[in-house]
Image: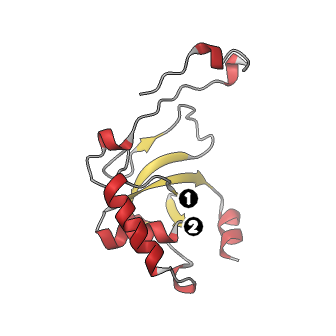
């Protein structure tokens, strides 16, 4: 875990500082995909709470709707390279997911998502932002 000395924080207003910690995925990756968390959508946030900003959670692949999957194709070589990387060092960048009324929608991270599928991994690390139905309609245009 990294602790930053207070001198880096002296120039920031104290009321806006939220606690967080950084942990290496290699040290705590129980499910083999380099994820910081395992199980059914457990939360790892950077301290704020209260629904502010995105949170990083582990979501089962089958709980993520991919509405644009049929209109896009992935580069097989890139998927294979990601599979190799995920097996060696884990997923380094979570995919972006929009949560609307408890349903998760994925519009990006297509290669990472497919790599997880092909590796048979049950979950993927996601950066989740909450949105409205209007936000979802905007993404579907």
The residue to which callout 2 is attached is 108
Res 19 quadrant in image: top right
In the image, is residue 130 above or below residue 63? above
Per the image, label 2 sits on a secondary structure element best described as loop
In the image, is residue 54 above or below residue 134? above
Q: Position of residue 125 (x, y in %)?
A: 43, 54
Q: Which mark is residue 96?
A: 1
Q: Residues within 10 Å of mark 2 (few under 14, many from 20)?
A: some
Q: Position of residue 94 (x, y in %)?
A: 49, 54
Mark-to-mark CA distance, 2 and 1: 6 Å
Q: Residue at x 42, y 55 (%)?
A: 91
Front residue of 77/91: it is: 77
Front residue of 121/47: it is: 121
**CB atoms of marks 2 and 1 within 8 Å:** yes
Q: Residue at x 56, y 58 (%)?
A: 96
Q: Quadrant of the C terminus?
A: bottom right
In the image, is residue 37 above or below residue 134? above
Q: Residue at x 63, y 14 (%)?
A: 7
Res 14 quadrant in image: top right
Q: Is residue 35 left or right of residue 139?
A: left
């Amino acid at each position: 875990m990294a602790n930053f000395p207070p001198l880096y924080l002296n120039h920031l207003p104290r009321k806006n500082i939220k606690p967080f910690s950084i942990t290496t995925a290699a040290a705590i990756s129980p499910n083999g995909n380099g994820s910081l968390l395992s199980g059914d959508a457990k939360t790892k946030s950077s301290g704020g709470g209260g629904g502010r900003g995105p949170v990083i959670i582990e979501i089962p692949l089958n709980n993520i709707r991919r509405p644009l999957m049929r209109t896009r194709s992935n580069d097989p070589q890139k998927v294979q390279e990601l599979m190799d990387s995920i097996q060696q060092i884990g997923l380094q960048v979570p995919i972006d997911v929009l949560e609307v009324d408890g349903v998760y929608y994925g519009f990006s991270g297509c290669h990472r998502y497919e790599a997880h599928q092909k590796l048979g991994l049950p979950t993927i690390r996601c950066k989740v932002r909450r949105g409205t139905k209007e936000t979802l309609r905007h993404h579907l245009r």
